């Protein structure tokens, strides 16, 4: 990787040139894309956890107490997700997709904000929090319906927690032994959010679809991800193997730093907005992004 640009103008110019030079982008987004929507991210500038790691799949499936704690925290944290609004980063990427700059948008986020900003055919690599499913009969249910069940049988007002990433809150030291987790209405099975937990494999079909899209794109643009999780990093590694250049816009270190063509060490929204203005030749507001038909 060449020396990373340092000033804001240099960063904007470098990313602008990258996008103009690679007209069909494979875009991969992470938590840093949604922080301006009020959803916290996971990692610091060094790529280390800011808090304890999220629940692991095996703990959720095998430990009823872990499920109690997960759903208690999620019940309190879900309103932050469904009340969140897309920010400038989401709108810019939606506009670029509509304008043909983006061949495929893949997100590691589970908040659905890309779709709400107008992006289409998004690959939700890790699933979506706005749905739940039974692990026995595989029936799916809207998260709002399950949330009403949770709140009906549990008194949410007795617990207060600190906001954490992906619809979670921290409830360390809180007794949750009386918290009730509703079973599946149809078969009595264990209900799980429709997301990929740590230690759980991303569905093969989803990964294969992303790989196919990557082969058809000219370059990779990573927005707001440290790529520390392999599920996202794999696409950068595949791009490097096929000599497709990779640009990253993210605060701090990433797992792919050694194979990047361009590294922009900055927050997402301001840089993306400035690049979008250069591409269009005029300043564009978030409302215009949302209403643009490309």
Image: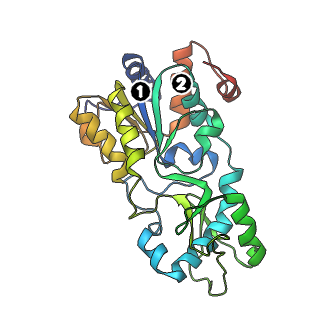
Q: Is residue 228 above or below residue 158?
A: above
Q: Residue at x 52, y 38 (%)?
A: 122
Instruction: Say how the picture is coloured.
Output: rainbow
Image-based side of 156 in relation to 234, left or right: right
Farthest top residue?
A: 281
| Residue 145 coordinates in the image, percent (x, y) | 73, 61
Quadrant where the image shows the C terminus:
top right
**Counting other residues with Cα less than 10 Å from the Cα at mark 1, is it few (<14), some (14-19), or many (20 or more)?**
many
**Counting other residues with Cα less than 10 Å from the Cα at mark 2, is it few (<14), some (14-19), or many (20 or more)?**
some
Q: Residue at x 56, y 46 (%)?
A: 34
Q: What is the distance, in whole Å, between disc 1 and disc 2 at their CAs?
A: 10 Å
Q: Is residue 236 above or below residue 127?
A: above
Residue that carries the numbered disc 2 in the rendered image: 96
Is residue 101 visible to us here?
Answer: yes
Q: Earlier in the sequence, mark 1 or mark 2?
A: 1
Q: Is residue 149 above or below residue 231?
A: below
Image-based side of 68 in relation to 160, left or right: left
Picture quadrant where residue 169 is located = bottom right
Query: Which is more toward the observer, 216 or 49?
Result: 216
User: How many numbered dots are placed on residues in this image?
Assistant: 2
Give residue 292's mark: none
Q: Is residue 208 above or below residue 76?
A: above
Is residue 253 visible to us here?
Answer: no
Query: Which is more toward the observer, 24 or 254?
Result: 24
Q: Secondary structure at mark 1?
A: strand
Contact between marks 1 and 2 (CB within 8 A): the answer is: yes
| Residue 152 coordinates in the image, percent (x, y) | 78, 73
| Residue 195 coordinates in the image, percent (x, y) | 51, 57
Give residue 25's mark: 1
């Amino acid at each position: 990787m060449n020396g990373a640009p340092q000033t804001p103008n240099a960063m904007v110019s470098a990313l602008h040139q990258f996008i103009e030079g690679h007209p069909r982008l494979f875009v991969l987004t992470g938590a840093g894309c949604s922080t301006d929507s009020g959803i916290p991210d996971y990692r610091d500038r060094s790529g280390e956890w800011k808090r304890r790691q999220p629940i692991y799949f095996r703990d959720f499936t095998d430990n009823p107490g872990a499920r109690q704690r997960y759903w208690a925290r999620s019940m309190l944290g879900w309103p932050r997700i469904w009340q969140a609004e897309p920010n400038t980063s989401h709108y810019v990427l939606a506009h670029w997709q509509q304008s043909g700059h983006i061949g495929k948008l893949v997100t590691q986020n589970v908040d659905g904000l890309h779709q709400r900003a107008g992006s289409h055919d998004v690959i939700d690599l890790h699933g979506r929090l706005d749905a739940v499913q039974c692990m026995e009969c595989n029936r799916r249910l809207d998260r709002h319906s399950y949330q009403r069940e949770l709140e009906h049988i549990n008194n949410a007002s007795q617990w207060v927690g600190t906001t954490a990433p992906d619809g979670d809150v921290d409830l360390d030291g809180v007794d949750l032994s009386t918290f009730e987790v509703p079973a599946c209405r149809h078969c009595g099975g264990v209900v799980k959010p429709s997301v990929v937990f740590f230690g759980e494999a991303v569905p093969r079909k989803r990964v294969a679809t992303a790989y196919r899209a990557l082969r058809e794109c000219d370059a990779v643009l990573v927005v707001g991800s440290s790529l520390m999780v392999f599920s996202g990093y794999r696409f950068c590694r595949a791009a490097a193997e096929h000599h497709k250049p990779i640009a990253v816009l993210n605060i701090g270190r990433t797992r792919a730093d050694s194979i990047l063509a361009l590294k922009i060490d900055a927050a997402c929204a301001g840089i993306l907005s400035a690049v979008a203005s250069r591409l269009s030749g005029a300043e564009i507001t978030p409302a215009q992004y949302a209403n643009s038909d490309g």
